[in-house]
Amino acid sequence: MSFSSYKEIGAVLKEFQITYTEDNFMGEVEFSISDYFREDLQTVMQDGVPNASEFSICENLIYPVLKEVWKCYRHKFVLWGHKSLTYDENLSGFPEYILAKRSPLGKVLFDRPYFLLVEAKQDKFEEGWAQCLAEMVAAQKLNNDLKITIFGIVSNGDRWQFGKLEADLFTRNQTFYTIQELDKLFMAVNYVFQQCEVQLIELVAV
C-alpha cells in the first residue's frame, strides 16, 4: 500500500495507534534571505505561472525555499527529491522531499530520514497530511525507533503547514505559514532544519 493510498489522517492514526493533538510548537529561527532569491521569486510569481501543475508548484515554489535553507546545513544533510522511501509493503512510496542524514560513505547513499514534505495536491491538505503522516511513520521505523522527532510539512506552494511525530504522538501546528510572508516562512523552515541538526548532534554524542 503506497503512501498516496492514505486519504484520511484518521485511518493512519488508527492503523498505527498514534495519538493526534494540535499545538503551536513551531519556533522561528532567523534566516537571511538573499536579494537574488527575493527578486527571482518575485519574477516567477509575477511573470511566470508557478502553479500551472503539481510539478510546477514543487519546482518553482516549494523546492527553492527548501534548497535555500538546506545550503546552510548541506555538510550534515542531503535534501532528496522524489526519492523512494520503503519500510514494508504498507509503507512505501515517493515523498516529494526528504531531508536525510548525510552518509559517511558519500552523498549518493540514503541515510537516516529526519523530515518529509508532501505537496497538498489540488489544495487537499487533509489528504496531504494522511500521506505525510504515513511517511513520517515509515521514517520513524527506518530509524529503528530511535527517539527522534520526525518533522513533516504539507504545502501547496502558498500555504505551509507543519507537524511532528514523537513516539506515538503526532502534533499538528495550529498556525500555518505562507509564502506571502516570506521572512516568517523561512524562519519556520529554518527552525525545522535546526531541530534536525540538534538531534543529529545529540545522537553522535551518545
Image (spheres, helix red, strand yellow):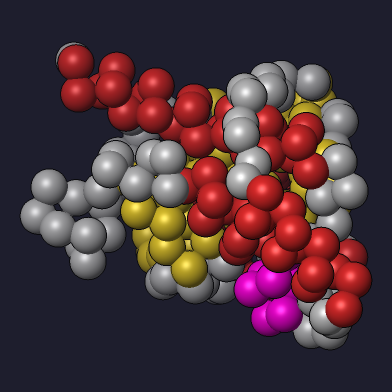
Q: Residue at x 42, y 56 (%)?
A: 79
Above or below residue 167? Residue 6 is: below
Q: Is residue 169 above or below residue 8?
A: above
State the quadrant of the C terminus.
top left
The spot of residue 139 in percent (x, y) is 43, 48
140 relative to 134 in the view: left or right: left
In which quadrant will I find the N terminus? Answer: bottom right
Vertically, is 134 above or below 173? Answer: below
Q: Residue at x 80, y 21 (%)?
A: 23
Q: Nearer the viewer, residue 32 or 69?
A: 32
Residue 191 location (% of width, % of height): 59, 28
Quarter of image, res 40: bottom right
Q: For the point 68% across and 20% down, which residue is it?
A: 27
- Decide if residue 120 is on the left or right side of residue 103: right
Q: Main secondary structure of the magenta part?
A: helix
Q: Which residues are magenta?
A: 55-61
Can residue 141 be spotted in the picture?
no
The reply to whether the magenta stretch includes residue 56 is yes
The residue lying furthest to the left in this view is 105
Q: Which of the 4 image quarters holds residue 84? A: bottom left
The picture quadrant where one finds residue 6 is bottom right
The image shows residue 106 at horizontal and vertical percentages of 14, 58
Closer-to-camera residue (75/162): 75
Give the residue drawn at x 90%, y 71%.
46
Front one among 99 and 4: 99
Q: Is residue 21 magenta?
A: no
Q: Position of residue 32 (x, y in %)?
A: 61, 34
